[in-house]
Amino acid sequence: MPYIITEPVKIPGTKLGYAIYPFQNHFLDKTRPLDENMFKLYIFELQASKFIEVKKTLYQKELFLSMRNSNLVDCELKKFIMNNEEYITNLDEMMIFLSPNVKKMRL
């Protein structure tokens, strides 16, 4: 089942966080029919604090809503982290988070 996150979530073992924002169309907007079935994935650099504070947006991508959302998000997160290894602080924690057997969030 697709899931929607609207607040940044910290990725353990990294200086990164991510958020998923659904597209919300107003009835007066002129949109294509496909725009209603999309969401945006953002990956942020987080500030060093005990709270989740966004320092800057590093990556954003539009994806289609589907039953495979969690797999698509996991693949995009893995690709980004592997291409930007300077944000990794603890490899073991990060690998546990990215493991397919770990639930990311309960609704």
Image (cartoon, rainbow, N blue to C red):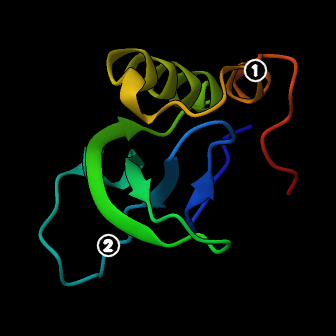
- Please tell me whether residue 38 is drawn above or below residue 55 in the rendered image: above
Quadrant assignment for the C terminus: bottom right
Question: What residue does disc 1 label?
Answer: 92
Residue 76 percent coordinates (x, y): 44, 25
Question: What residue does disc 2 label?
Answer: 25
Res 9 quadrant in image: bottom right
Q: Name the amino acid type tagged 2.
A: Asn
Residue 65 percent coordinates (x, y): 49, 39
Q: Is residue 98 left or right of residue 46?
A: right
Residue under the image location 52 percent in, 64 percent down: 48
For label 2, the SS is loop
Callout 1: 10 Å neighbours few (<14), some, many (20+)?
few
Residue 74 percent coordinates (x, y): 58, 25
Residue under the image location 50 percent in, 46 percent down: 15
Q: Is residue 92 left or right of residue 84?
A: right
Nearer-the-camera pick, 36 or 62: 62
First reached walking from the N terminus: tag 1 or tag 2: 2
Res 104 quadrant in image: top right
Res 103 quadrant in image: top right
Task: State which mark lies toward you, 1 or 2.
Answer: 1
Residue under the image location 36 percent in, 55 percent down: 36
- Please tell me whether residue 72 is drawn above or below residue 87 in the rendered image: above
Quadrant assignment for the N terminus: top right
Q: Is residue 10 left or right of residue 76?
A: right
Callout 2: 10 Å neighbours few (<14), some, many (20+)?
few
Label 1 and label 2: CA atoms lie apart by 40 Å
Q: Is residue 45 left or right of residue 98?
A: left
Q: Name the amino acid type tagged 1.
A: Asp
